[in-house]
Amino acid sequence: MNRASFYLPQAGRVIEAPRSARARFAIGNIVRHKLHDFRGVVFDIDPVFANSEEWYESIPADVRPQREQPFYHLLAESEDSSYVAYVSQQNLLEDGEGGPVDHPSIAQMFDDFADGHYQVRRGVSH
């Protein structure tokens, strides 16, 4: 089987994931949620669902995403707030707005905003 296992502290469990996964978006890309009115910049990607079971079960069953797909960590913004979001690939679209994201943590992780995406700051990586 072409899978890898690793312990993820934020999930509190061992995660099994394909050794290779196809992410539609990259770190620094700006995306928009398909169902909810917010957008954000990708700052990390999990190859499969890697959050807690409690978080996963809190999503209503009729809209709960599949686990076996990339999940994105976003510095997100809505009309009235900024926050960190964890979103499945199936629920994201490229952002058509094209402008920068107004999140207070952007400067900690990214440098310039150009051509519709952010450049990761030097020295910020796994």
Image (cartoon, helix red, strand yellow):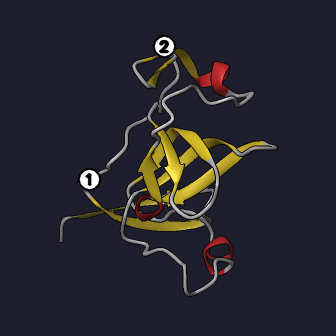
Q: Which residue is painted at 75% across and 44% down in the image?
A: 79
| Left or right: 58, with 94 as reference point | right
Where 22 falls versus 65 (above or below)? above
Q: Quadrant of residue 61?
A: bottom right
* Quadrant of residue 115 within the rendered picture: top left
List the single residue furthest toward the right: 80
Q: Secondary structure at mark 2?
A: loop
Marks 2/1: CA–CA distance = 25 Å
What amino acid does circle 1 point to?
Arg
Q: Name which of mark 2 and mark 1 comes first in the sequence.
A: 1
Label 1's element?
loop
What numbered label is drawn on residue 22?
1
Residue drawn at (46%, 30%) of the image: 28
Q: Is residue 95 above or below residue 4?
A: above
Label total for image? 2
**Left or right of 27 in this view: 40:** right
Instruction: From the top left corner, tell me how far across and down residue 8 is, in percent.
Output: 54, 57
Of residues 60 and 36, the one drawn nearer to the viewer in this rendering: 36
- Return the x and y of residue 103 as percentages of the image width and height: 70, 31
42 relative to 21, above or below: above
Residue corresponding to mark 2 = 122
Query: Label 2 is placed on what type of residue?
Result: Arg
Give the camera-side residue of 94 and 120: 94
